[in-house]
Amino acid sequence: MGLCGLFQTGHTQTFGLKAISVSDSSIITKDLRTFDSLWYKCLIHYGKNDISNLFADNSPSVSKTNPITLLNFINGIDVPLCNVFEFKLVNKQVLNDSILLFQLDIGWMQFVIPFNRNKHKLLRFESINLFDLNKYQFKNLTVYSKNKINKKEFVLLFKTINQTAEELGINVDSFFAKEYVIYSGSTLKESYSYVGGLEYVNYFNKGSIFGGMGDPYNHVVLSGIQKPIHVHELLHFVIKFPCNNFIGEGLASYYGGIGSKSYTENLGQVLEIIKSKEIHNFSEINNLWMYDNAFNSLRGSYVLAAFMLSQLKKDFNNEIYRKFVRQCRTDQEMIANLKILYNVDSEKLLFDKLFYTHFK
């Protein structure tokens, strides 16, 4: 059976392809069989039971039920975890005398899982990071980056967190009681590779090479933007009350920007797109987000959500604003509450009032 292999060399990643055969008995080794057994146990209990005993690098700071950052990102985008059971061995590399890297293919992406052959246990890729990164610490945040980070960046971050919490009426004690880690690269593809993602995930279009993702279980952020501190992603850990995705991303974008800039920088282009495509409801925004590369590259739904929140703050008092964002646990609740606030009967009238008045 021919498979595609990805190769990792020294402190850098290469993305070349090579056909290998796994029918050879020299490849199906005792180590591979042990790894396969552990990986199956890991997945069958993942997110439900304590699987920390399967890992050699068990740590109090790591989730016992969701210990692998990369898998949490896979699960976080509604890809069934059962797909990961259907992995194929891409390649095996010897890192050193005790650690092997098993590179897996799950059909839509490739990633690596380390295996400690002496302890017969799995490892987290973050614990054996092969990249030459600088480590910066400030309060409860650690950042791994190739680039130098000025202390001013940290100060601005925590100022934003405190101001956001004050405006939304959030207690930030629980946030500061935990440790957070950012792996910062020049692009999301680069930061993704730091935790074992060997191939760029295909749900990002080519225009969306910058961005970030947050793991809610291990409090890890993968950041690929022009600034080393990803405020937007960290705010997701601060704003913990339940709300639908539109409001959740809108809050993080309104207070923390989209990537390394304010949402307002993309606002004009995003509004022009919905006007040119004659979008008049929220479900069509979701379709644009999934299928329109230009809209996706501009983080269009994030921009519209942040703009909508700015409108609400302008049109109503802060008490109503705080209450509204906490009442939007579903899209239906959000639309219903907006109709009441703006005294309109249809979603089209509501949508046009929120987004089309900009053109008048």
Image: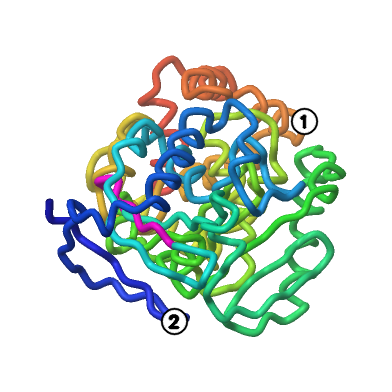
Q: In this view, does 174 lie to the left or right of 255?
A: right
Q: How many marks?
A: 2
The amino acid sitting under disc 2 is Gly
Which quadrant holds residue 100? bottom left
Question: Which percent across, then down, holds residue 140?
Answer: 80, 59
| Disc 1 element | helix
Residue 105: in magenta span:
yes
Q: Mark 1 points at which residue?
A: 319
Question: Which percent across, then down, holds residue 49?
Answer: 61, 27
Q: Seen from this angle, which residue lies furthest bottom? A: 148
- Upstream in the sequence, badge 2 or badge 1? 2
Q: Can residue 353 be seen in this view?
A: yes
Q: Distance between the residues labelled 2 and 1?
A: 55 Å
Q: Nearer the viewer, mark 2 or mark 1?
A: 2
- Residue visible at 29% across and 66% down? 6
Task: Using a 10 Å C-alpha cutoff, classify the residue at mark 1 as few (fewer than 14 neighbours), some (14 to 19) or many (20 or more).
Answer: few
Q: Name the residue under label 2.
A: 10
Task: Using a 10 Å C-alpha cutoff, classify the residue at mark 2 as few (fewer than 14 neighbours), some (14 to 19) or many (20 or more).
Answer: few
- Quick one: 314 or 238, which is closer to the camera? 238
- Quick one: 322 or 172, which is closer to the camera? 172
The magenta span reads: 101-109
- Residue visible at 60% across and 47% down? 55
Question: Which percent across, then down, holds residue 95?
Answer: 47, 71
Q: Is residue 330 left or right of residue 205?
A: right
Which quadrant holds residue 342? top right
- Quick one: 200 or 303, which is closer to the camera? 200
Question: Which percent across, then down, holds residue 168?
Answer: 76, 40
| Disc 2 element | loop
Q: Is residue 286 visible?
A: no
Proximity of marks 2 and 1: CB atoms separated by less than 8 Å: no
- Quick one: 47 or 323, which is closer to the camera? 47
- Residue visible at 53% across and 74% down? 130
